[in-house]
Each structure stands twice: as structure tokens, then as C-alpha cells.
Amino acid sequence: MNRPEITLILARAANGVIGADGKMPWHLPADLRRFKQLTMGRPMIMGRKTFDSLPAILEGRRHIVLTRDRDWQEEGAEPVATVEEALKLANAPHVMVIGGAEIYQLFLPLADRIELTEVALSPAGDASIAAPDPAEWREIAREDHPAADGRPAFAFVTLARKRG
Ligand SMILES: NC(=O)c1ccc[n+]([C@@H]2O[C@H](COP(=O)([O-])OP(=O)(O)OC[C@H]3O[C@@H](n4cnc5c(N)ncnc54)[C@H](OP(=O)(O)O)[C@@H]3O)[C@@H](O)[C@H]2O)c1
């Protein structure tokens, strides 16, 4: 089949942090709901560390996991060693790349779309990524949410790759 449409989905703090100690350094229920809605029914591709960070297998979605360890296996995970192998195994018109930082880096050159949650915090962390380059990405949707109930402000932003 042709190359699938590839969407990166990620939540990123203002200072670039996406993870700390194997977890996300915030709790945003609205973001988790959006993640579920956007990933449901689509194969998810992730790094082994992100798989390890999941509380459980996420229903209704395949878990394709990049690892260099040929012996690695876990219930519910489909291990692969390369980007090409991940896309081939997914065998779907639209795949979701769900992190973490290493795996976003690998797939960024191939990605068609980024579903970004901008989180108005600057926490300490050990996994971070650069902001999408405006020369390469065009904002096609934005939904701003003010801080409320002890949660930080955040925005749901959809970015499409600029063509030509
Ligand atoms: N904010 C968000 O949206 C978001 C989303 C996802 C994750 N996170 C956070 O991000 C952190 C994890 O990110 P991370 O960058 O440390 O790890 P990661 O990208 O989830 O996984 C890294 C692992 O992927 C495998 N890998 C990496 N490059 C590979 C390649 N070229 N070929 C084959 N396998 C490869 C390796 O597994 P092996 O070591 O097994 O070989 C590597 O250790 C956690 O804190 C998590 O909570 C945040």
C-alpha cells in the first residue's frame, strides 16, 4: 500500500518539556479525552519507554512499539525495529505516532500533521522536543482554553505540513 497519512500527537509545555521521570508532568483530563478521540481505531506507534509509561493497554487501538531489543515482548504490544517496519505492520491509511521524544524525532520528517496540545507551564523534565518550525508547518485550527480548576491554560492546535 502507499505510505499512510502520519499524524504526530503530543502535548508540549512552553519550555519544550513533554515528559519527566517516565511520566507527563501535568494532568489534563481534557487532553486525555482528546487523545482518546483522535487515536481511537487507528494504529498507534510509540517508543518502548512510552509503552512502559502507559497505565494499561488502551482499548480499541493497536500498540506498535519501536525497540532495539529483539527479545522484547509484552502483552498487547507489537514490537518493531525500524520506522519502515512500523508503517508496514500498521498497514492502515492513517497512523498515529504517540511519542515519546525519540520517536517524534524519528517520524517528524515523514509526518503530515501534528495534533499539538500547548500547555502553559514550564516544568522540569527529561524529555523535550523543539517547537514545530513555522517554515514547515501551518496552523489550521486552534482552540484556546483558559486556566481553570487548578489546571494550567492550554490550547489544542492542529498543524499541517506546508507543501511546495
Ligand atoms: N507529552 C506527550 O505528549 C508525551 C507523549 C508520549 C510520551 N511522553 C513522555 O516522554 C517520555 C518518554 O520519551 P523518550 O524519548 O524518553 O522515550 P520513547 O521515545 O518513548 O522511547 C525510546 C525508546 O524507543 C526505542 N527506539 C528509539 N529510537 C529507535 C530506533 N531508531 N529504532 C528502534 N527503536 C528505537 C528504544 O527502545 P529500547 O530501549 O527498548 O531499545 C528507546 O529506548 C516519558 O516521560 C513519557 O511520559 C510524553
Image (cartoon, rainbow, N blue to C red):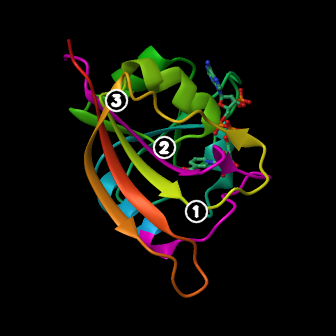
**Front-lying residue, 116 or 135:** 135
**Of the residues under marks 3 and 1, which one precedes in the sequence?**
1
**Ligand 1 closer than 8 Å to label 1 CB:** no
**Magenta run includes residue 5:** yes
Q: Which residue is pictured at 71% across the width and 41% down the height?
A: 127
On the question of residue 85 being in view, the answer is no
Q: Quadrant of residue 31?
A: bottom left
**Of the residues under marks 1 and 2, which one precedes in the sequence?**
1
Answer above or below: position of 83 versus 97.
above
Check disc 1 and report the residue beneath it.
56
The residue segment tinted magenta is 1-30
On the question of residue 153 being in view, the answer is yes
Cα distance in 3D space between marks 1 and 2: 15 Å
Check disc 3 and report the residue beneath it.
137
The percent position of residue 115, horizontal first and vertical second, equals 37, 46
Q: Amino acid at mark 2?
A: Ile
